Every structure is written in structure tokens, then in C-alpha cells.
Image (tube, rainbow, N blue to C red):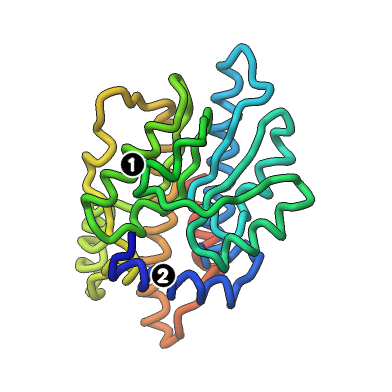
Amino acid sequence: MNTEYDKLIKTHYDGVASEEKNSGFSTMANSFVRDSETKFIANMVGKYLNKREKSEGLKVLDVGCGNGYTLGKLAPSFPELSFAGLELTDSLREIANESLASQSISVAGRDIRKMDMLKEFDVDILICQRVIINLLDQNDQKEALQNLLNIVNNGGLLIFIECFDSGLQSLNKARKEFGLDEMSPSHHNLYLNDDFFNLSGLKEFDLSQKEFLSSHYFISRAIHPIFLSLNKQEFIRNSEFVSFFYKVFSG
């Protein structure tokens, strides 16, 4: 498959690979979000394993794993599991395989829009962080989701972290009240509709942290910009301001 948007996505992530290499900032420049998501994934995997009679040898697949950062963090915490990754961008996959070699984790190059490229996989836990939104066509998004569901075993765990139109709309309502301009998705993202995962056979596993980053995004993208504007300061990523007030509001 060679669509016009494939070139855009490749160019973007080749740039990420060149700039960030094996850094934790690769594919996610916000350190707080990166750490929070990694902890969230580990927590969900732990809860899932606690409900299983046997966990030894279960297979974990990180789809669109980038430079392998999440896999590298998870594997030491769950030595009884078997880890692997998929990454279509050659430059990121090369970094991932080099970084994960010492942990005997391999990352393959596969296109999740093509079921024939996924048939070899037999997965118990599937992780997917902001991958579906990189498919800039709704039909491709739906087909990729179905393909991923097809390789997960009955009773398996699916962990998707994606972005939705409704969340952006809510954020923009708040920004409008504060006199701020609307935000749009990044050029390489197509956000999902709320009903995207409403498919038969899917059952929600744990809702306790359904909106675990909502407060952070409200603070970082609505309150923080006002503070910067009032004080005539430039945007600061991973600022102490955002970190402090997130802890206050979420504590």
C-alpha cells in the first residue's frame, strides 16, 4: 500500500528518528504524558495478569512501537511474558531492534492495513499508542482495527491509547472561553469518532483510569497558555507550572 499520506507519515517519523533516536521523547515529546502512559499500560497489564490463572509465556505485541521505548520499560517488570513489536518506519525500527537486542525483543516491519502481513502473529496482549490516528483515511483506520482484532486471542487484552474528536472539541470550548485560538490535530493525525471501538465482541476491561490525562491536557493547553500570555513568555514544554498544577488537581 503506497498512499500519498504514507509519504507524509514516513517523512515525519524519519525526522523523529533522526532527532530523538532512542530517547523517551521519540514519538511523544511530552515527558509527563510519556511516563503516565507507560505507567498506565503497566498497570493494565498487571491487572490483567492478576485475573489469569496462568500468565507464563503470554505474548505481548506493541503495534507501532516506534523506537521500542515502551517495550524496553515493560519487559523487565514482566519477565514471564514474551514481548515483540511492529514498526513500519524503517528508521525507527532499526533503532528499536538495536535498543532491544539485549532483552531479546525483536521488532518487525508490518503494515497493519494488510491482514496477510499479520497472519503469523498470535497475541494475548496488544498495545497500540497513537497508531490508528496516523492512518489518514477512515476506511484504513477501520480496516487496521479489524486486522489487529483478528490476531488477538479470545479473552486477550487490548490497550489502545488514541485521540478523539470529542476530546479536542471539549478542549477548544475551554480555550474559546479563555480567548485562545482553536487547536487542530497535528498534520500527521486523523482523530477518531467516539464510537470507533463500539464493535461486537469487545468488552471494556477497566474504566478506573478512562480519562487519566484529561486534567493534564486542560492545564497544559488551556490554563498554561493564559499564564504564558499574561507574562509575555514563550511556550515551554514539560514545564514545572503544568507539572505542579496537575499534581494539585489530580491529587
Front one among 72 and 57:
57
The residue that label 1 is drawn on is: 145
Image quarter of the N terminus? bottom left
- Quarter location, residue 92: bottom right
Left or right, residue 119 beside residue 192: right
Q: Is residue 57 above or below residue 97?
A: above
- Rendered image: mark on residue 211: none
Q: Who comes first in sequence, dot 2 or dot 1?
A: 1
Residue 133 lies left or right of residue 120; in this view the side is left
Count the marks: how many? 2
Q: Which x, y percent locates residue 120?
A: 51, 36
Counting other residues with Cα less than 10 Å from the Cα at mark 1, is it few (<14), some (14-19), or many (20 or more)? Answer: some
Q: Nearer the viewer, residue 149 or 250?
A: 149
Determine crowd level at label 2: few under 14, some 14-19, many 20+ residues with C-alpha closer than 10 A: some
Numbered disc 2: secondary structure: helix
Q: Position of residue 208 (x, y in %)?
A: 44, 31
Circle 2 sits on which residue? Answer: 224
Numbered disc in front, either 2 or 1: 1
Residue 196, above or below 182? above
Residue 17, how many percent across, how many down? 57, 71
For residue 251, side relative to residue 166 (left or right): right
Position in image of residue 116 (x %, y %) = 40, 42
Taking the image as shown, residue 170 lies to the left or right of residue 57, namely left
